[in-house]
Image (tube, coloured by chain):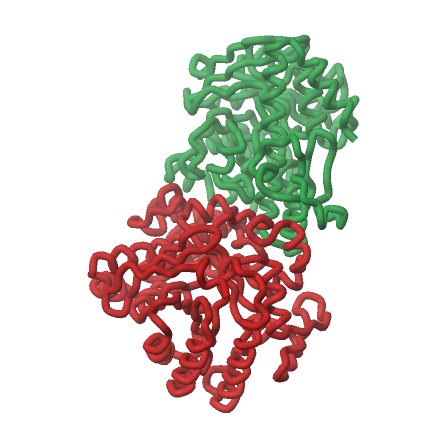
Chain colours: A red, B green
Amino acid sequence: MATNLFQFQLNATDGNARAGVFSTPHGDLQTPVFAPVGTQATVKALTPLQLEQLGATLVLSNTYHLYLRPGADLVAEMGGLHRFMQWPHPMLTDSGGFQVFSLAEMRKVDDDGVTFKSHIDGSTHRFTPEKAIAIEEKLGADIIMAFDECAEPHDRVYVERAMQRTHAWAERCLRAQTRPDQALFGIVQGGIFPDLREHSARAIAGMGFAGHAIGGLSVGEGKPEMYAMIEVVNAILPADKPRYLMGVGTVEDLLNGIARGVDIFDCVLPTRLARHQAAMTRTGRLNLLNAVHAHDPRPIDEHCGCYTCRTFTRAYLRHLIVAKEMLAATLVSIHNLYTLVELAKEARRAIFEGRFERFAAEILQNME
Amino acid sequence: MATNLFQFQLNATDGNARAGVFSTPHGDLQTPVFAPVGTQATVKALTPLQLEQLGATLVLSNTYHLYLRPGADLVAEMGGLHRFMQWPHPMLTDSGGFQVFSLAEMRKVDDDGVTFKSHIDGSTHRFTPEKAIAIEEKLGADIIMAFDECAEPHDRVYVERAMQRTHAWAERCLRAQTRPDQALFGIVQGGIFPDLREHSARAIAGMGFAGHAIGGLSVGEGKPEMYAMIEVVNAILPADKPRYLMGVGTVEDLLNGIARGVDIFDCVLPTRLARHQAAMTRTGRLNLLNAVHAHDPRPIDEHCGCYTCRTFTRAYLRHLIVAKEMLAATLVSIHNLYTLVELAKEARRAIFEGRFERFAAEILQNME
């Protein structure tokens, strides 16, 4: 369903790296793309205007959080997530699966769904594939995710069982979808086991989703394992649909993901690090609380084009952090998000120009 | 000193209300004007760009806070306060007097100055008139304030002694000033006692300051007392210099101050209320946490032109507050500051058009 509304045009490839355009009811997404996370219908400490100005095109929000607060019905009543948070461009919601397994208390999984207690007030709730899709339809994002079970990636027995459940739930999500204006993505699971990943990729790819996601990575496994899994999966996923690597967002991982054919990324890391005084740059991280910055008149990154770097010194940013001023989180979030959003844009240009491998290698070489 | 750089042109009067232009090295200030407060070299939760966009023209910062953290020398090393916090328009610093008397621990006043302990780390410091001016010269604001003693307004014996000290310190501040590019304002004290206020206004007015401030009000006295004191003082202060009512910032007080000939206002109230879920409007305050707003699709104020009101619903703002999202403070601060900044601008137009009294009366009538 709905695939016609959501054309994915592949404009260029360079090795396995891809540059494309994914059309949505709220505008075209140029890929590769990095999506800032707005967990509770706000990218923390930023206005939608600031998000636009730093170049963001896709924003993710979390179904689990919005379901608990303020509730999907309220968001629907306010005209859906785009209007509620005033982000008029493409949006994506996850299915709540990952949060139920990482945040909620006392969860109980069965083949039909998951019962869990809210991390906010301890109240009991139940998600099933059908319920997750119903909530995502109320929220109204352009890209919605199938409900999946995210297992600890090294426990083969659990990983395999969770994968089978994920496949069964994926079918149910497809059947449950009623809105034609949302692209439903299936999620590949399988932990760090190449044969399970291969099996999962084939199963999910065969179901007719509008796009595909790689879930269950960046959850504690090593980087070589993560990159190997991306390769296994992307060799199977069809080239003519977008590929989304969930929850991944460092300079290094973006470049490695793009090199292996990933189109879409999201992560809370840039904004979370920003609230903990850490600036992300192409050469590594900077702890802005460090006394070495106290008298430093330079911006975080002299080569960066973000508002923060064009405007403020490290000395000022450190002062804001020491003085516990909220503006610190805003300014460092702008910088960190710009770093990844802009990296994806430059990667896209490099792919068009057939120089992605060199582009990525040069940056990775300079990483601390 | 320095008065030539700081021309004050009175363009229109309407009753006692005045519309003027105060020229500073960082641009002309159109008065009446409301100045947002950036205590620690940042108006809390707002970027300078957001301040510009909401129409702010003058920003105040606090000498006491900046002296303690990050230190006046660091600010000077970074090119002064304008460059440090990247506010390229007119700025004002207080002298630290009010904060020493309201925030610092274990203060000891003598005729030479004040010894106090930092509210941050308990370290001991001493301010004298000469020290305060030296710090303000390092900070480099366009308008700087004389060092004064702010007494509990009802204690006549203390008020009178503090007033005499304030006058002696005012003379010392004038002698201590060395920078020609800063307008030094003297501060009238005298508590709630008309004869003391009269005496203080005459004394301060005779010293040759570039502008005059009314201090020691809005600190616990009643509104009739405050308005009466403004009348007593402004009848004496020369008309050809700007008048600044310190620490005052509600819709009601701005209108009443302008009606009595005040040109400049500042207050932390708009941003402080914003961080406590209260929106200021021309008809009263709105507690946005109130459940009545949960499903309200209206903006805070349908007649308001600020970014927040043009963009977001009360339902969304309440959600941000309930979810403890930083963006709430940003968006409500934008609204509250706009309310006062815009009120002063509209008052100015009303003065030019000879209809200030009606303008003020209509708003005051509709206040809750």
In the image, residue B263 sits, relative to residue B47, either above or below, namely: above
Kindly tell me whether residue B319 is visible in this rendering.
yes
How many numbered discs?
0
Image point 50% across, 39% down: which residue? B41
Image point 74% across, 33% down: which residue? B284
Query: Is A123 placed left or right of A164 in the picture?
Result: right
Query: Is B286 placed left or right of A207 in the picture?
Result: right
Between residues B26 and B62, which one lies in front from this camera angle? B26
Residue B260 x %, y %: 69, 15
Kindly tell me whether residue A290 is visible in this rendering.
no
The image quadrant where one finds the C terminus of chain A is: bottom left
Residue B39 x %, y %: 55, 39
In the image, residue B190 sits, relative to residue B40, either above or below, namely: above
Query: Is A75 placed left or right of A149 in the picture?
Result: right
Q: Residue furthest bottom?
A: A157
Quadrant housing residue B27: top left
Quadrant housing residue A64: bottom right
Between residues B19 and B116, which one lies in front from this camera angle? B19
In the image, residue B265 sits, relative to residue A50, either above or below, namely: above
Image point 55% across, 60% down: which residue? A39
Residue B228 x %, y %: 76, 18
Residue B42 x %, y %: 51, 40
